[in-house]
Image (cartoon, rainbow, N blue to C red):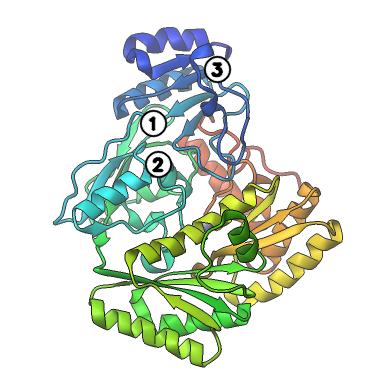
């Protein structure tokens, strides 16, 4: 049991309902880990608030005792931020999962932090709208976790990151104070934008409890093409061509680099829409004029085929075919992580330097481990590549590749956050002055350092 946990329990029990407190043997093992850290230790205490007022009571009590908490949404994060460390209790938002009715005039929806992303997407669709962010973990990942990590995913080139969907939010600070900007106004310059400070803060500045989200008009037609390409250069040229010819219609531009497509389709038994090739691209459009938009999209593809940028392509004829293409794309991470321990990099890179990075990354990895297996896929339209090395030289390969990405002018975390696992590499990205400013912000919001302690950075500066 956590030291002083008895005092905490005695204080909280009269203020919360019985299902809000799990301790000892009642704590399910699932609270002990997240997707990045399977099988981590089970926490001694889990708090499951039903309301913002409950969250406030819990944080106030922990803050007074100086005891640490980790905040959990759907535990699908890939940087270890939601894995409880020794002595930490868990604050789970799973019982705060309400999605309010869509406000059709404002084109917004309000959701509690524990609502799964998919519930928000479905509420939007049912009201004739579309939600701008989609990620593979949509059924489990929660809105609060999406805010905390500034989730990205497959449609960023059209609708932006999660940050762009947040019109306002409510959060509880470490001392129990509730800060709220839930007016849902598109324009509001009345002082600091406190809502955006929590986006991407990985639970270090407060516990997000409710969010007001922007909705987009629902496209009347979705079409996608699955393409085989001769090279990465051809994929970059295709991206440029599709952007130029289809403008705002372009909703996704995903790539899978060899040998992932061949190995994955062989292992999964999923249909191969086109044959094997050095690069495959899934290009998608969201249109509002069914016939006209589809022919613009098809003509651009035709032009790419004639120019030799694409060697083979299948254009979807139904929504079911669009979904089948996406199943292939969603299978990428599942296939790779089922192979065993991996170094997973979530990189943003300037497109002009991507080819050079891939060559260097392969040479660097092979020098450290000739038996390593390398896979790359991701959101080329955003310059975001997931680069995965299956290797026994985990630490050396990880350090070398993160350094290479920073040297190439990229980011070591495009959409997965820093958490515990990328913390050592943060000084590659941020100056001592920036890190000092982040620590000052953290100290102002959470002076006793009780919230997600040691995630993103430690409060003591790095030596040297
Ligand atoms: Zn991704």
Q: What residue would you read off at disc 2?
A: 142
Helix, strand or loop at mark 3: loop
Q: In the rendered view, does 118 fall on the left or right side of 404? A: left
Q: In which quarter of the view is residue 262 placed?
A: bottom right
User: SS class of the residue under badge 1?
Assistant: loop
Q: Is residue 345 visible?
A: yes
The image's mark for residue 447 is none
Question: Label 2, label 1: how many angstroms apart (C-alpha)?
Answer: 9 Å
Q: Secondary structure at mark 2?
A: loop
Indicate the quadrant where residue 10 lies: top left
Q: Residues within 10 Å of mark 1 (few under 14, many from 20)?
A: some
Q: Residues within 10 Å of mark 3 (few under 14, many from 20)?
A: many
Q: Which mark is residue 94?
A: 1
Residue lying at 60% horizontally and 73% vertically, measured from the top left: 279
| Sequence-first disc among 3 and 1 | 3
Q: Give coordinates of residue 437: x percent, y percent.
A: 55, 48
Q: CA distance from mark 3 to mark 1?
A: 18 Å
Q: Is residue 226 left or right of residue 376?
A: left
* Residue 134, image quadrant: bottom left
What residue lies at 26% left-to-right and 40% top-to-bottom?
Answer: 99
Residue at screen point 59% across, 63% down: 377
């Amino acid at each position: 049991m956590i030291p002083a946990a008895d005092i905490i329990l005695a204080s909280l029990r009269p203020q919360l309902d019985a299902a809000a407190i799990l301790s000892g043997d009642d704590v399910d093992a699932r609270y002990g880990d997240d997707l990045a850290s399977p099988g981590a230790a089970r926490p001694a205490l889990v708090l499951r608030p039903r309301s913002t007022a409950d969250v406030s009571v819990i944080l106030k009590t922990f803050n007074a005792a100086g005891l640490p908490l980790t905040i959990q949404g759907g535990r699908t994060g890939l940087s270890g931020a939601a894995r409880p460390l020794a002595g930490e209790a868990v604050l789970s938002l799973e019982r705060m999962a309400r999605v309010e009715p869509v406000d059709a005039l404002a084109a917004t929806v309000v959701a509690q932090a524990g609502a799964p992303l998919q519930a928000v997407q479905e509420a939007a669709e049912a009201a004739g709208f579309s939600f701008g962010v989609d990620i593979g973990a949509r059924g489990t990942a929660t809105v609060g976790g999406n805010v905390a990590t500034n989730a990205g995913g497959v449609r960023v080139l059209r609708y932006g990151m999660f940050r762009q969907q947040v019109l306002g939010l409510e959060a509880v600070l470490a001392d129990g104070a509730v800060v709220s900007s839930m007016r849902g106004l598109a324009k509001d310059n009345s002082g600091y934008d406190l809502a955006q400070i929590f986006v991407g803060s990985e639970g270090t500045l407060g516990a997000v409890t409710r969010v007001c989200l922007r909705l987009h008009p629902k496209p009347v037609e979705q079409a996608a093409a699955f393409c085989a390409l001769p090279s990465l250069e051809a994929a970059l040229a295709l991206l440029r061509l599709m952007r130029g010819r289809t403008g705002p219609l372009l909703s996704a531009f995903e790539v899978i680099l060899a040998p992932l497509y061949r190995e994955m389709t062989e292992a999964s038994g999923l249909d191969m829409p086109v044959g094997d090739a050095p690069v495959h691209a899934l290009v998608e459009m969201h249109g509002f004029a069914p016939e006209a938009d589809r022919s613009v999209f098809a003509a651009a593809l035709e032009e790419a085929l004639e120019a030799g940028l694409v060697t083979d392509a299948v254009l979807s004829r139904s929504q079911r075919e669009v979904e089948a293409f996406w199943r292939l794309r969603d299978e990428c991470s599942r296939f790779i992580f089922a192979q065993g321990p991996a170094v997973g990099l979530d990189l943003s890179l300037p497109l002009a330097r991507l080819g050079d990075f891939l060559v260097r990354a392969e040479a660097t990895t092979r020098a450290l481990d000739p038996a390593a297996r390398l896979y790359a896929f991701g959101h080329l339209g955003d310059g975001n590549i997931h680069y995965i090395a299956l290797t026994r030289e985990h630490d050396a390969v990880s350090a070398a590749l993160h350094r290479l990405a920073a040297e190439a002018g990229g980011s070591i975390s495009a959409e997965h956050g820093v958490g515990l696992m990328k913390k050592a590499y943060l000084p590659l990205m941020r100056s001592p002055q920036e890190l000092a400013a982040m620590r000052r912000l953290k100290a102002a919001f959470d002076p006793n350092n009780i919230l997600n302690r040691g995630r993103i950075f430690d409060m003591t500066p790095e030596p040297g």
